[in-house]
C-alpha cells in the first residue's frame, strides 16, 4: 500500500511538472482535470490566450494590438470591434470543461460600452450555440454565468453586486465553478455564492472558444484590453488568487 500511494503521488507531481515545463515552452498540453486530484496551487491550468497565438511573433491577428498592461512589465492586448477571437474548443479544452474549475481573467473596458451585453468568454457548439461562458451586462451592471444542459436548456447564474466592475479601470474576475454552487470574486473580493446544479453542464469539444463577442451582433467584438485569461483545474483557486498586479484604488 505504501508503494501504491507513493506512486500515485509521484505520478500526480510528474503530470503537473510536465504541464508546467510545456507551458513555459509555449506548447499546448492535453490534461484532463477530472483525472487529477487537485487541491492546491500546483494544480495545472489552461492559458486560453496563449492558444490564440497572439504573442508568438507570428502575423498579427486582425483587430489585436499589443499594449502595456496593468504595469509596464505586464503585456496586454487591445481588441478592437473587429477582433472576433474564436478558435476550436479542442485546441483549448481537448477533454471539455472540467466538472469543477476556476476561471480567471484580468481586463479593462476603456471606452463607453453603449450598454452592451457581451461575452467575456464563451464556449459554443459547432453551430455557435451556448455551452458555457461568462457574460457582462453593461446596462444592468451584472455578471452572468450561462450554461446549457444536456436537454438543450439554457441556465443563467446572475451576480448583481458588480457595480465596481464598470468604472473603465483594470479589473480581475474570478469565477469558482463547483458541484453545487458558483462563486464570483471581483478584484479578489468575494461577491456572492449562488446555488448551481452540475447537471446543467453539457460540453463537447467540437465547437469553439470565443472572447469578447457582442451577444446581439456576433459580427463585432467588445473593444477591451485583455491581460489574462486562464482556467484552473482547482475550483478553490479563485478564493486564493491575489490581485497584486492591479493598480491601487484611488479614493476621491
Image (tube, rainbow, N blue to C red):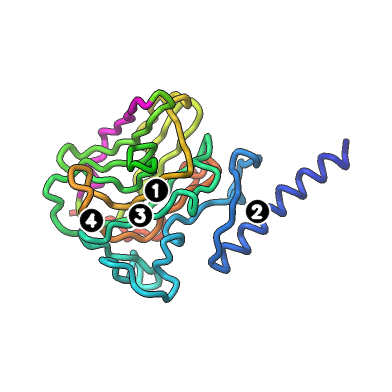
Residue 205 in sight from this viewpoint: yes
- From the viewer's side, name the closer residue of 185 and 252: 185
Instruction: Say whether disc 2 or disc 1 marks the residue closer to the N-terminus.
Output: 2
Instruction: Say whether disc 2 or disc 3 marks the residue closer to the N-terminus.
Output: 2
Q: CA distance from mark 2 to mark 4?
A: 34 Å
Instruction: Say whether disc 1 or disc 4 marks the residue closer to the N-terminus.
Output: 4
- Give the numbered dot on residue 109: 4
The 10 Å Cα crowd at callout 2, few under 14, some 14 to 19, many 20 or more, is some
Instruction: Say whether disc 3 or disc 4 marks the residue closer to the N-terminus.
Output: 3
Would you say the residues marked 2 and 3 are in contact, meaning their CB atoms lie under 8 Å apart? no
From which residue to which does the magenta span run?
152-166
> Circle 4 — which element?
loop
Residue 196, given in percent of the width and then of the height, sits at 42, 25
The 10 Å Cα crowd at callout 1, few under 14, some 14 to 19, many 20 or more, is many
- From the viewer's side, name the closer residue of 169 and 133: 133
Mark 2 sits on what residue? 16
Instruction: Say whether disc 2 or disc 4 marks the residue closer to the N-terminus.
Output: 2
| Residue at position x 45%, y 72% in the image | 56
Q: CA distance from mark 2 to mark 1?
A: 26 Å
The 10 Å Cα crowd at callout 3, few under 14, some 14 to 19, many 20 or more, is some
Mark 1 sits on what residue? 208
| Residue at position x 32%, y 71% in the image | 66
Relative height, residue 58 to residue 100 (above, below): below
Residue 177, given in percent of the width and then of the height, sits at 46, 35
Would you say the residues marked 1 and 3 are in contact, meaning their CB atoms lie under 8 Å apart? yes
Q: CA distance from mark 1 to mark 3?
A: 6 Å
Q: Image quadrant for the N terminus? A: top right
> Circle 2 — which element?
helix
- From the viewer's side, name the closer residue of 134 and 189: 134
| Res 112 → quadrant | bottom left
Residue lying at the far front of the rendered structure: 127
Amino acid at each position: 500500500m505504501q508503494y501504491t500511494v507513493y506512486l500515485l503521488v509521484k505520478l500526480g507531481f510528474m503530470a503537473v511538472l510536465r504541464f508546467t515545463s510545456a507551458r513555459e515552452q509555449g506548447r499546448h498540453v492535453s490534461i484532463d482535470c477530472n483525472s487529477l486530484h487537485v487541491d492546491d496551487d500546483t494544480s495545472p491550468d489552461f492559458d486560453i490566450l496563449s492558444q490564440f497565438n497572439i504573442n508568438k511573433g507570428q502575423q498579427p491577428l486582425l483587430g489585436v494590438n499589443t499594449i502595456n498592461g496593468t504595469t509596464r512589465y505586464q503585456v496586454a492586448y487591445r481588441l478592437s470591434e473587429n477582433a472576433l477571437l474564436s478558435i476550436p474548443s479542442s485546441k483549448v479544452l481537448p477533454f471539455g470543461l472540467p466538472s469543477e474549475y476556476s476561471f480567471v481573467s484580468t481586463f479593462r473596458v476603456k471606452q463607453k460600452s453603449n450598454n452592451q451585453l457581451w461575452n467575456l468568454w464563451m464556449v459554443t457548439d459547432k453551430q455557435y450555440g451556448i455551452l458555457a461562458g461568462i457574460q457582462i451586462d453593461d446596462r444592468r451592471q451584472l455578471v452572468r454565468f450561462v450554461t446549457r444542459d444536456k436537454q438543450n436548456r439554457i441556465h443563467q447564474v446572475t451576480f448583481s453586486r458588480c457595480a465596481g466592475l464598470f468604472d473603465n479601470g483594470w479589473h480581475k474576475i474570478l469565477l469558482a465553478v463547483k458541484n453545487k454552487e458558483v462563486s464570483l470574486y471581483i478584484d479578489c473580493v468575494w461577491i456572492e455564492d449562488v446555488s448551481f446544479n452540475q447537471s446543467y453542464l453539457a460540453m463537447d469539444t467540437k465547437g469553439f472558444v470565443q472572447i469578447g463577442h457582442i451577444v446581439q451582433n456576433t459580427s463585432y467584438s467588445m473593444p477591451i484590453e485583455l491581460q489574462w485569461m486562464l482556467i484552473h483545474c482547482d475550483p478553490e483557486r479563485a478564493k486564493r488568487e491575489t490581485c497584486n498586479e492591479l493598480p491601487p484604488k484611488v479614493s476621491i
